Image (cartoon, rainbow, N blue to C red):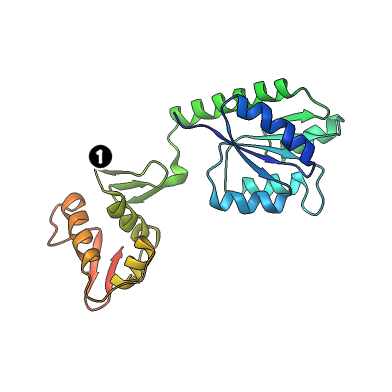
Amino acid sequence: MTQPTILLVDDEKEIIDLLEIYLKNEGFHLLRAGSGTEALQLLEKEDVDLIVLDIMMPKMDGIQTCMKIREQRNMPIIMLSAKSQDMDKILGLSTGADDYVTKPFNPLELIARIKSQLRRYTRLNVSLPNKEFELEIDDLTINTSTHEVRLDGREIKLTPREFAILELLARHRGKVWSIEKIYEAVWREAYLNSDNTVMVHIRKIREKIEDNPRKPRFIKTVWGVGYKVE
């Protein structure tokens, strides 16, 4: 089972050091950020299951950071603050936080709250399909989170490269991608003119998702230019 990843965001290094000891003992994978800006940058690169976010930070505080995170992401957020007034708690929760813990706190209590939020989040996401990660083209559904492809409800098995090509075209519907651009985007290396790898992969994808690969519904050929999904 994959370890849940917790992002700790606090400008007080001593607090992060303390929490890191407790969370690692519980089997969590830890990411650290000393500011709201650093946290947002990490979220662009890393998959995070839960965020522990301090409110009182210089420049971008926890409230602003929480609002920014909620524009795109829905993982649980637990606020930390030295303030204990009810209005501060209400403000933190109203901006999208799921829980609020006042400093000083018992690390074991925070661990219990983290586990509770993760259980709740996992349960909700199992019972309710997450449409946020789904690309739909007629009766073709591409889930970019689970890497599942379904055609009229039937699962289609694609290799990682085939999935990456289909996802690329589906994310940019209507845009024509040359063979060179597809190769560089998916393989992340320079394209060689004599290489027909992309064409082979396109053919295999069509064989799996098209009723008639010679007259494709999904991946269209733009002769002399490349491919697109309409």
Q: Quadrant of the N terminus?
A: top left
Snapshot quadrant of residue 161: bottom left
Snapshot quadrant of residue 186: bottom left
Mark 1 is surrounded, within 10 Å at the Cα level, by few (under 14), some (14 to 19) or many (20 or more) other residues, namely: few
In this picture, is 230 found above or below 115? below
In this picture, is 112 found above or below 71? above
Q: Quadrant of the C terminus?
A: bottom left
Residue 185, image x and y in percent? Answer: 38, 64
**Residue at the image point whose x is 60% and y is 24% from the top:** 26
Residue 149 shown left or right of residue 43 in the figure: left
Report helix, strand or loop for mark 1.
strand
**Residue at the image point whose x is 22% and y is 54% from the top:** 205
Q: Is residue 53 in sight in this rendering?
A: yes
**Residue at the image point whose x is 33% and y is 70% from the top:** 177
Q: In front here: 19 or 175? A: 19
Q: Is residue 178 in sight in this rendering?
A: no
The mark tally for this picture is 1
Q: Amino acid at mark 1?
A: Glu
Q: In front here: 81 or 196? A: 196
In this picture, is 160 found above or below 153? below
Q: In front here: 198 or 14? A: 14
**Residue at the image point whose x is 67% and y is 33% from the top:** 20
Q: Which residue is mark 1?
A: 155
Residue 202, image x and y in percent? Answer: 22, 60
Residue 177 shown left or right of residue 15 in the figure: left
Residue 97, image x and y in percent? Answer: 69, 36
Residue 185 shown left or right of residue 9 in the figure: left
Residue 154, image x and y in percent? Answer: 23, 39
